[in-house]
Amino acid sequence: MTDVTRAARTPRAHRALRAHRAPSAHRALRATLEIPETRPNPTREAPTRWPGTARRSLFRSAGRIDASTPASRDRAVDALRAFAILGVVLGHWLVTALVADGNSLRAASPLGDMPWLAPVSWAFQTLAVFFLVGGHVATRGYATARARGESYGRWLSARLSRLFRPVLAVLGLWTVTAVLLLLTGAEFGTVHTLVKLALSPMWFLLVFAALTAATPLLTRLSPLWPLVVVLHVDLLRFGFGAPSWLGWLNLAAGWLVPFTLGAAWTRGELDRRRSGWILLTGGTAATAALVAWAGYPASMVGVPGTPVSNLNPPTLAAVTFGLAQCGLALLLRDRLRRAMRRPVAWAAVALVNLSAMTIFLWHQTALMATTAGSLLLGRLPGLHTRPDGLDWVAARIAWLPVFALVLAGCWAAFRSCERGGGRRRTRVVAAHRPRRRATGTGARHV
């Protein structure tokens, strides 16, 4: 036996060799979540029964994130936010089509030629859940800020800064892109379609920011008041022929309903399961009645070419549908808390939450970059063809991993904009220092 072989079998050399050969997946995930090198709690570390060094490293990283999360954190809230964001992303990817017509691109939707696909919009139009969580987090955070003597201005600045930092990168890139396209001879209609799709997610940010700024006034507001406003606006529009612009009042009132439901959640008024069941059954019944007998569209998203959209601006049907979604979300809280005890599941949710705005703002860009970039290969099914059959649906589903890969590239390039460049503080995970270095502040949020 050679000296090299004998040395390699010593415990210290074996550990060094294993660390050298281990992939850097866990280091990348730890760097993404900004968790320093600490020894994970062995009682909470994920099992390593799965073969393969990479999988063991992934489980160790997930166990470290799990152990670094404050025990007081309600992980169901983060899970609901992550599912709401991913639902919107998948929904847009499934129902947004860019049809190549000569040298131009025009927007289309499979819901126009295949209205029986409307249930797809029921599953992936999850904005009401995002506003529910947003209202809950905003009112709870404002109460905490007041308790520790923090001013309203400082609290609001902290809330909105991370919300709008990624917007600047999107606006800058698409301003340059639009100018270059026009200078190189692209049709104005094509440029308008691309820019409109890229910037369409920003309407949500403006409404969400306005409701967040009004949080002190909304902490005690009953959701019934904005619901009554939506009811009367629709009654005037569709029943008495009022001007269509009146419907834009629902842009604030419609999303105020789930936001104030979140405030009621903070007050403890929705803790009983009966509240979730009332919202779910009542919202479902009301939505079904409005679609069946009041002439509201079955699709919960806008369809190009249709006279009425349930989303732009929100209609009474969209609001009652949102109530049903909020009821289902409240009923799933306990199951989500149990599911988030699994380190790998929680690590994935934490990663989505740390990059929620980046994912939301760049997902349409990922779709359009894939569509425009592949035009050099010809008109590809599921990308450039008219969405009028099941073959298009099957092809579009096959393209989803490509969209996700391009979005991952956008995330890698622009995620620092959301975190402000450099190390930023976040309360998703907390790194606990060793006891010998502990200070009076306890856990350090990173």
Image (tube, rainbow, N blue to C red):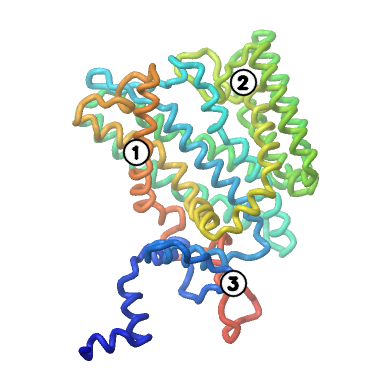
Q: Secondary structure at mark 1?
A: helix
Mark number for residue 66? Answer: none
Quadrant where the image shows the N terminus: bottom left
Mark number for residue 174? Answer: 1
Residue 11 location (% of width, % of height): 37, 85
Q: Secondary structure at mark 2?
A: helix
Badge nearest the viewer, 3 or 1 = 3
Residue drawn at (69%, 24%) of the image: 230
Front residue of 316/241: it is 316
Residue drawn at (58%, 52%) of the image: 159
Horizontal arrangement in the rendering, residue 91 relative to residue 102 (left or right): right
Residue at image mark 2: 247
Residue 302 location (% of width, % of height): 51, 22
Front residue of 153/73: it is 73
Q: Is residue 270 above or below residue 310?
A: below
Disc 1 marks a residue whose amino acid type is Trp
Residue ranking furthest to the top: 240
Disc 2 marks a residue whose amino acid type is Gly
The disc, 3 or 1, on the residue closer to the chain's N-terminal end is 3
Disc 3 marks a residue whose amino acid type is Thr
Q: Is residue 244 above or below residue 427?
A: above
Label 2, label 1: how far apart the Cα atoms are: 29 Å
Q: Residues within 10 Å of mark 1 (few under 14, many from 20)?
A: some
Horizontal arrangement in the rendering, residue 406 relative to residue 236 (left or right): left
Residue at image mark 3: 43
